[in-house]
Amino acid sequence: MPNLSGRTVLITGAASGIGAAAARRLSADGARVVLADLDGAKVEKVAGELGQVAVKADVTRSEDIERMVEEVYRRWGRLDVLFNNAGVIRVQPMFDVTGEEWDRVMNVNLRAAFFVLQAAARRMARQEVMPGSDLRGKLVHTASIAAFRGGNHMMTPYSASKAAVVSLTRSAAQALAPQRITSNCVCPGAVETPMWEQIDREWGALEGAGEGEMWKRRIRGIPLGRPERPEDVANVIAFLAGPDSDYMTGQAVIVDGGMVMGN
Ligand SMILES: NC(=O)c1ccc[n+]([C@@H]2O[C@H](COP(=O)([O-])OP(=O)(O)OC[C@H]3O[C@@H](n4cnc5c(N)ncnc54)[C@H](O)[C@@H]3O)[C@@H](O)[C@H]2O)c1
């Protein structure tokens, strides 16, 4: 039953994987969505299929952040939900991490996540509450179980960035509660997306494992017995974007088939 009728949503990293699945799910639930991504052609295609709006934007650039947020206000006059989801990764041993690589991952996953949430919340704080709610807006970020789980030494900057996203989620929740804006994050596990294809490739090359081998090893131990699909995350995003989660803020919601319990 659609429960997002009329809600306006901005999704970053919307051309692929989890972002695209969230765009599909929230559209089906009645939301109006701006899909933003670095990959202009791909985001246009996904948005076109959904009858929604595409914006080519690099979230590490302040002018692009302003432009994508402005697009939502120009069209609909308000932004109800930000899904702050764009992210990048690199699998490499800790001793091989260079300053450039550290900065690249941190710039997208952490610095941009902060400035996107800041830009969105600044505008949200000045708008009326959402129809049928006592909130002005909702922020939903994408962290990861890498924020909590050991064994991520092959993705040290990535894991650090995602732990910091959990921290950002909570700082924003406290800072913005008086404005009646909530901030929560989702922590996916091992999701079948192009990002995991990259992880499998890079990790496999380091371990001398064939294509698909690292993925097989990763999903073998999932208690619920199957890999995570982007739709598994999108279902929880629909909950965090909708009215049923209006009394939640500052939470890191793990959606991983049971890999991490009791963080
Ligand atoms: N796949 C997983 O197993 C997994 C697990 C936990 C968390 N996550 C997180 O979920 C989010 C989505 O990942 P995914 O698996 O769907 O990956 P994906 O690679 O399929 O999609 C990521 C999207 O982000 C976009 N992007 C990258 N840099 C950008 C930038 N500077 N500006 C705008 N867009 C940019 C890419 O173009 C791509 O479309 C990421 O934050 C990722 O860290 C993924």
Image (cartoon, rainbow, N blue to C red):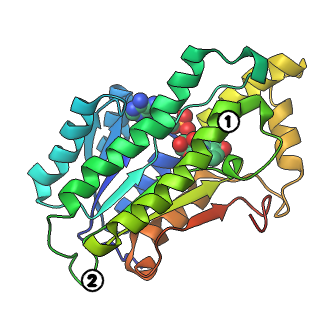
Disc 1 marks a residue whose amino acid type is Trp
Q: Quadrant where the C terminus lies?
A: bottom right
Q: Residues within 10 Å of mark 2 (few under 14, many from 20)?
A: some
Q: Residue at x 77, y 68 (%)?
A: 262
* Disc 2 Cβ-to-ligand 1 distance below 8 Å: no
Q: Position of 155 compared to 104: left or right?
A: right
The residue at which mark 2 appears reads as 134
Marks 2 and 1, the one that precedes in the sequence: 2
In the figure, residue 131 lies in which quadrant? bottom left
Q: Residue at x 61, y 56 (%)?
A: 187
Question: In the drawing, what numbered circle is on residue 196?
Answer: 1
Q: Quadrant where the N terminus lies?
A: bottom left
Counting labels gives: 2
Q: Position of 10 compared to 151: left or right?
A: left
Question: In the drawing, what numbered circle is on residue 48?
Answer: none
The image shows residue 252 at horizontal and vertical percentages of 58, 63
Disc 2 marks a residue whose amino acid type is Asp
Q: Residue at x 57, y 50 (%)?
A: 143
Q: Position of 27 compared to 98: left or right?
A: left
Tell me the CA gap for discs 2 and 1.
38 Å
**Cβ–Cβ below 8 Å for labels 2 and 1?**
no
- In this view, 156 is above or below 251: above
